[in-house]
Amino acid sequence: MDSTEQNTDVLVIGAGMAGLIAAAELQRAGLRVLIIDKSRAVGGRMASRRIDGATFDHGAQFITSRNPRFATVLEQTRQNGALKEWCRGFSGREDGHSRWCGIPGMSAVAKHLSAGLDLRLEMPVTALQACKSSWRTQTARGETYTSAAVLLTPPVPQSLALLDAGGVVLTPEMHKRLSAIEYERCLAVMAILDSPSSVPRPGALTLNEGPIAWIADNQTKGISSEPALTIHATHAFSLEQWDCDRMESGRSLIAAAAEWIGESSVKTFQVHGWRYSKPLYVDESPCILAHTSPPLVIAGDAFAGPKVEGATLSGWAAAEMILKLRNVF
């Protein structure tokens, strides 16, 4: 084996919720598991960012739970100090369901769940290749990973691109099914204010018209020491503005948010583009076995639901599927 080649039982590509949850489950079952991700931090769209003295959740804003098993995970995370209840509804309409957020940001939840896992960050994958009884995964940094099974958890278009790059041929039905999964785009503005905003408690609003879908005050939310707004654009605005100057798009969204900025002034702002914000269409299965021998499973929030809980349920389903195929390892 080449010095740049490493071997493991299961290679998990993607360190979002589906990947982390699946990896932990497989590791508990006694398998050697390695997670690789192209980003600098775990969590995927459960992302937080610091700008000067302000903290922003600029991806997923909160977590809800209906599943008892997932509720247990959230309670354990809360007990470990990485999660708190934010509120039970927005715009003055409480519905009794807890909205949870990470401490000191949403990324803290993923960091907590990644503890004890073998994880390599800033490791972009360029291609997957199926051998007789294993997978060879190549990265942009020149490493090669050999594994008995692979779990793919990136957004589906990215997963399909990796398979195409490695010459992995799916059945026409499978390719059509996966290609049908599309995602909303979202331009996210992170704006630091010089004084508190006019966003009412608990610190967020869902809007029904105009270019803004969501606006949140991270200070009122309790994660930022300074007034800091996260503004999420609608899919329509984001798609229309995607290839335009990001700062100009940001200024347009800030202007549209004038009512909630109030008497404050924007000191500085940044714009992040989420190409795969959330799936427009969710597959009927919690995960997909795309290749049987060697096993290749595809999972994520496009399969069990476009929320943090859905990604988690998909991760558990993927781990269960891989364990059932353990005899082919």
Image (cartoon, rainbow, N blue to C red):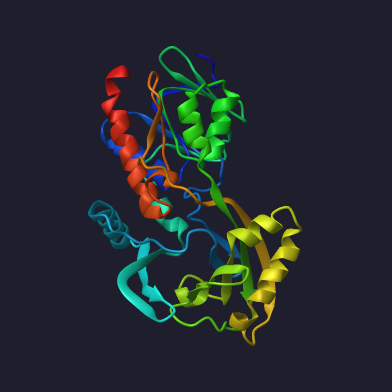
Q: Is residue 270 above or below residue 88?
A: above
Q: Residue 57, position in %: x, y? A: 51, 63
Q: Residue 31, position in %: x, y? A: 31, 29
At a point 64% along the width and 87% down the height, the residue shown is 263
Q: Is residue 274 above or below residue 54?
A: above
At a point 40% along the width and 19% down the height, the residue shown is 294
Q: Residue 138, position in %: x, y? A: 56, 25
The image quadrant of residue 257 is bottom right
The image quadrant of residue 24 is top left
Would residue 112 be visible to someone looking at this image? Answer: yes
Residue that protrudes farthest toward the bottom in the picture: 263
Q: Residue 187, position in %: x, y? A: 62, 59
Q: Is residue 321 above or below residue 193?
A: above
Q: Is residue 89 left or right of residue 49?
A: left
Q: Is residue 29 left or right of residue 55?
A: left
The C terminus, quarter of image: top left
Viewer-closest of 281 and 52: 281
The image quadrant of residue 322 is top left
